[in-house]
Amino acid sequence: MKYLSTRGGMAPLPFCDILLEGLAPDGGLTLPASLPKLSSVQLEAWRNLDYADLAAQVLGLFIDDMTPEALQRMTRAAYAPSVFPRIAPVKPLSSGLSLLGLSEGPTLAFKDMAMQFLGEVFEAVLAQRGQTLNILGATSGDTGSAAEYALRGKKGVAVFMLSPHGRMSDFQRAQMYSLQDANIHNLAVRGVFDECQDIVKALSGDLAFKSAHHLGAVNSINWARIAAQVVYYVWGWLRMTHLPGEEVSFAVPSGNFGNILAGHIARQMGLPIRRLVLATNENNVLEEFFRTGVYRPRSARQTLATSSPSMDISRASNFERFIFDLVGRDPRRVVTLMQELKQNGQFDLSALKPKFTAEYGFVAGSSSHADRLQTIRSVHQEAGVLIDPHTADGVKVAREHLEDGVPMLVLETALPAKFSATIEEATGIRPPVPEALADLSRREQRVRIIDCSVQQVADYVQQHAL
């Protein structure tokens, strides 16, 4: 299995090489030269596997430069009961909807599902190669804590995580900033998430700086994150079906497009997915694209602060991988579109709109603060289940795209305890906090607040890199 760049300027590389790189040298994103295919026979053979062994099978389709035994050791460590007391349970709601419970890990967010595997594979590959890695990432709330909890104390790895100052929930901030591990560095940037992400891209695109400081990435520009997320689409499909070829739809709250991109990859591999239902909040750049065919990111000033803050994103860093498929995997066309985006602030692919649903299964919708309050309230009244605001966005849009005879799985984004203020506003109920995190708000926090400056971040990384 070899990997290429969406922009065509990278020689084919094996998995372990792209694992340590993040962005491709040409500024594009890496992805397989060709996707492996899933057969109905293969899927049926996997039906009784536990999650760790299913992950080893699915990830093995993308990783052929390590032994199956080594890969299985990593997945069994990543998905052990001590890490996930429950793993990806299906939670029935009503009217044909169910939740796929992806938030049972250490940071109570779906990002744990991929990040715990990354922690294992990073440490193993770095030890094998005798190298160190400095992870530079940006988070709108959940990626940061999931990465830090997966990599805290890992040998050969340091984490530099940028977050938008004052634009995450109290719980999210406390989860990240309370970590005292020497290899974890939290930088709160005076700006919005997209600006944090721009700083990461600028430094990752500076090849001399990247090489000198051994920079890598842990957000969903890293292909390993996407590959690990494909696993739970297969897991969810196996739990919602009984016969080969039965279709399931998935509704996915979407900010950076990584979570739903994994569903797109699974569908392209042959998993019988009927619809990929993309849900946004008020920052509806992606919903607008699937409705109009025009991709028009907003400026930092136009990016709204909402009650589903992890989706307060206007430039989805994973979207380029989907565009690559949409334009026939033509890297020259991708480069042209990225130039148009830089020059004009948008690009227009409305001529390809018929492919969005007919070929790729995408439909989309958005949700407002009033919508998510009503959805949280109605789900609790109807099913006795509390859901977080992002998951509520997913449920709201999923309800608009239900089809008779097709189960709809909504990917749970986080546990409601992470966003208690919104849950209380909707229901009057304060969601329970897991016992292990009961004292979180009282823990000492360690964070550096900095200006929205590439140079300030570069200076900090230079001073503290391994």
Image (tube, grey):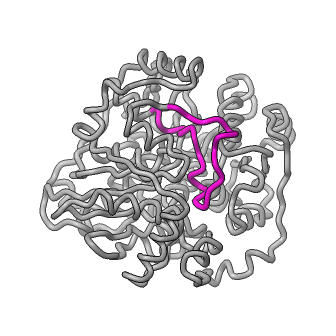
In the image, 364 versus 137, the foreground residue is: 364
Q: x%, y% of residue 166?
A: 76, 56
Q: Is residue 178 visible?
A: yes
Q: Is 190 on the left or on the right of 367, as rendered? A: right
Q: Is residue 59 visible?
A: no
Q: Is residue 298 magenta?
A: yes
Place residue 65 in its image quadrant.
top left
Residue occupying the point 25% across, 52% down: 273
Q: x%, y% of residue 242?
A: 15, 67
Residue occupying the point 59% across, 83% down: 428
Q: Is residue 158 magenta?
A: no
| Quarter of the image with the N terminus in it | top left
Q: x%, y% of residue 329?
A: 35, 24
Helix, strand or loop for the magenta stretch, by majority: loop
Q: What span is in magenta? A: 296-320
Residue occupying the point 19% across, 54% down: 42
Q: Is 344 on the left or on the right of 251, as rendered? A: right
